[in-house]
Image (tube, rainbow, N blue to C red):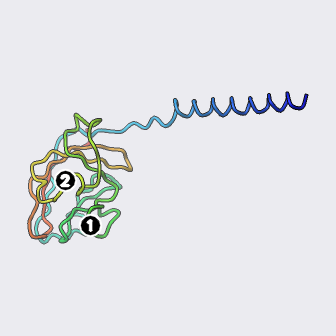
Amino acid sequence: MKNILFSIFIISLISCSKEKEESEISSGPNKEYEIWSGPNIEFKKEVGDDPKDKLNQDEITSSVSLTRGTNGEIYNAVLEEKAQKGVSPIGTQWAIGSIDNISNLSFSSFRNAVGSPQNVVGKSLVLHIIDQDVYLSVEFTDWGQSQKGNFTYIRSTKK
């Protein structure tokens, strides 16, 4: 009798565990991302502009404010003091392509996505802001040479 009760108990545990697993899979976090397809704006940082000054940062969301220092890379002034090659801007992911094709894009760090930053001008990019799960279009129209910190891009905004 003990063996039968123990067997029923074990089967019940397995069954409950399996039901819980299936429930978590089918009704797991249905996190929906947001695509910003509002009007485009231009952000421009001139040679010699202080990247620590908020006027020289593009505050896109509360977790991402892009700027460029004199070491050649863009970075997120909310989370970083300066750019880290191959890592910055922290809190973002980038892909070359169109936001209309978002499900087929492969996202990575800015440098991994674009290669050499000075070759980014004219490429259509999609920026993923990780914390808010927001995607927006970005196209760089200028990337200043000689690590002077200047750059310009056009990006989409929230509707």
Residue 13: quarter of image: top right
Residue 104 or residue 56, whichever sits in front:
104
Q: Amino acid at mark 2?
A: Val
Q: Position of residue 22 (x, y in %)?
A: 57, 30
Q: Are marks 1 and 2 in contact (CB under 8 Å)?
A: no
Residue 119 or residue 8, whichever sits in front:
8
Q: Amino acid at mark 1?
A: Ala
Q: Which residue is mark 1?
A: 83
Residue 64: quarter of image: bottom left
Q: Which residue is mark 2?
A: 114
47, above or below 112, in the image = below
Residue at 32%, 44% in the rendered image: 134
Q: Position of residue 114 (x, y in %)?
A: 19, 53
Residue 10 or residue 105, whichever sits in front:
10
Horizontally, is 146 left or right of 64 in the view? left
Residue 55: quarter of image: bottom left
Q: Position of residue 35 (x, y in %)?
A: 29, 38
